[in-house]
Image (cartoon, rainbow, N blue to C red):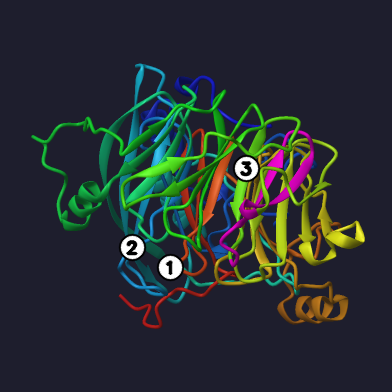
Amino acid sequence: MVRSIKNPKKAKRKNKDAKKGDGSSSSSSSVPSKPTKVWQPGVDTLEEGEELQCDPTAYNSLHAFHIGWPCLSFDIVRDSLGLVRNEFPHTVYFVAGTQDEDDVWQKNLLGTLLEYLRYQILVGKDVNWYLTSLLLVMMIWIVKAVTVMKTVKMREKVVLGIRFCRQYFLRKVAHQGCINRIRAMSQNPHICASWADTGHVQVWDFSSHLNALAESETEVNPGAPSVFNQTPLMKFGGHKDEGYAVDWSPVTPGRLLTGDCKSCIHLWEPTSDSTWTVDANPFGGHSASVEDLQWSPTEADVFASCSVDGHIAIWDTRLGKSPITSFKAHNADVNVISWNRLASCMLASGSDDGTFSIHDLRLLKGGDSVVAHFEYHKHPITSIEWSPHEGSTLAVSSADNQLTIWDLSLEKDEEEEAEFKAKTQEQVNAPEDLPPQLLFVHQGQKDLKELHWHSQIPGMLVSTAADGFNILMPSNIQSTLPQDVGV
């Protein structure tokens, strides 16, 4: 299992002046003279004089920001700005839980990032100027992104400059204990549930904070309190230990599941918009810690759980407190699971041994539900999530500091790859052993913890790590650039 950041102070950024000094050079000597090579962490080594470079053509958008302390968990909050948004500017609302150890009272941050991008594409290019500007804005030292499509297509764009204008506002709410995991209800996004290391689960109403953020056009009033003291709607202390597993039902508004490190799962039933009854008699069937929970996207009474015992269990709340089926999913701890909302028979799981698998639940009666198994990552899987827009696509994060995106519908086409390379005469030395389903590799964050797709902005991913957040839109996932790219 891979969980909390034990000492967040160590994750704070080093001297910013030193970073700016190192990243300010725009000398053409930093551009490698030899052909570009795709670098694989844990496989390749950096020779003396070599450095990693971010390929800017791999992204439609890439931003990084830090809110002061590391966040183990966050969730993207559904907003009213449109169901499918493909043009900039973009606004993203999220709720995040910090790992501040300075005080017994921690901070639960609700924030919005307003992102304005204006692309300028002219004849001629100055790649080094672009990379230097990107590094200064983002303050990321080692970033390498690799775009791997079925045809190993690497886009080339003529880029002279890029302008960034971004704002983000925070609303801080006091929270007792470090936040292990936090989730917002999809039907009522102002309602959030947080798991604390104190062993308590709390449910919050953040409507006032969301309204304040939505109305803010300038910085938050300096005279306002820096941290709001707010009483949660409900605080449940019936778990025997702290936990990490929590999920809101996508079918029944307000229905909630929480699982702890003592293998117990409790069901929360809403009695009104702001009150719940928690079943004191927990679901039991795992022999070790429950690491993650997922409601079925189509059935109101069915959910899945995964555990350190290596098993995944399927439950029906109408049929008692034992699982209706349980199967061995991995040879190590199962850290995370994700139920595909576009193809409800598919369940993805990620393990402590770095592997992740795709299970077809229709095959459970036959004994082996695994339809795909990947061993690309060499360190524990920390997060996994299906795309809300493409049923065959999912994203995975790992303790090897990689965020990968996969499309299970792709197959290797050697003839097409050879034809494309002959036409473009590109000099990119892509590794031969990359799985054909691997679409994208994002690097640059340290100690990746969690990722989420934005359900309303196709192609947008947000990830959190010890050194802050990244918002990325890979260029081969969804074309989101406006048609008019002139200044």
Residue 304 part of the magenta segment: yes
- Above/below status of 217 relative to 225: below
Residue 176, compared with residue 258, is above or below; it is: above
Q: Quadrant of the N terminus?
A: top right
| Real-space CA distance between mark 1 and mark 3, rounded to the nearest whole angstrom | 24 Å
Q: Is residue 132 visible?
A: no
Quick one: 379 or 419, which is closer to the camera? 379
Which one is earlier in the sequence, the residue at label 3 or at label 2?
2
Q: Which element carries disc 3, helix, strand or loop? A: strand
Relative side of 196 to 261, left or right: left
x and y, in percent, of residue 277 in the image: 43, 42
Quadrant of the snapshot with the C terminus: bottom left
User: Residue 456: which numbered mark, if any?
Assistant: 1
Examine the rendered structure and indicate whether residue 384 appears above or below residue 277: below
Which mark, residue 292?
Answer: 3
Residue designated by label 2: 79
User: What kind of element bears circle 1?
Assistant: loop
Query: Looking at the picture, does residue 118 appear above or below residue 17?
Result: below
Disc 1 to disc 2: CB gap under 8 Å: yes
> Quick one: label 3, few (<14), some, or many (20+) residues within 10 Å?
many
* Disc 2: CA contacts within 10 A as few (<14), some (14-19) or many (>=20): some
Q: Where does residue 46 sit, x and y in percent of width and height?
A: 72, 38
Mark 3 and mark 2: Cα distance apart in space: 25 Å
Q: How many marks?
A: 3
Residue drawn where x is 35% and y is 49% of the image? 191
In terms of sequence position, does the residue under pointer 1 or pointer 3 come before the other? 3
Where disc 2 sits, the SS reads loop
Stretch in magenta = 298-318
Amino acid under disc 1: Gln
Can I make out residue 278 in this image?
yes
Given residues 36 and 350, the one toward you in this image is 350
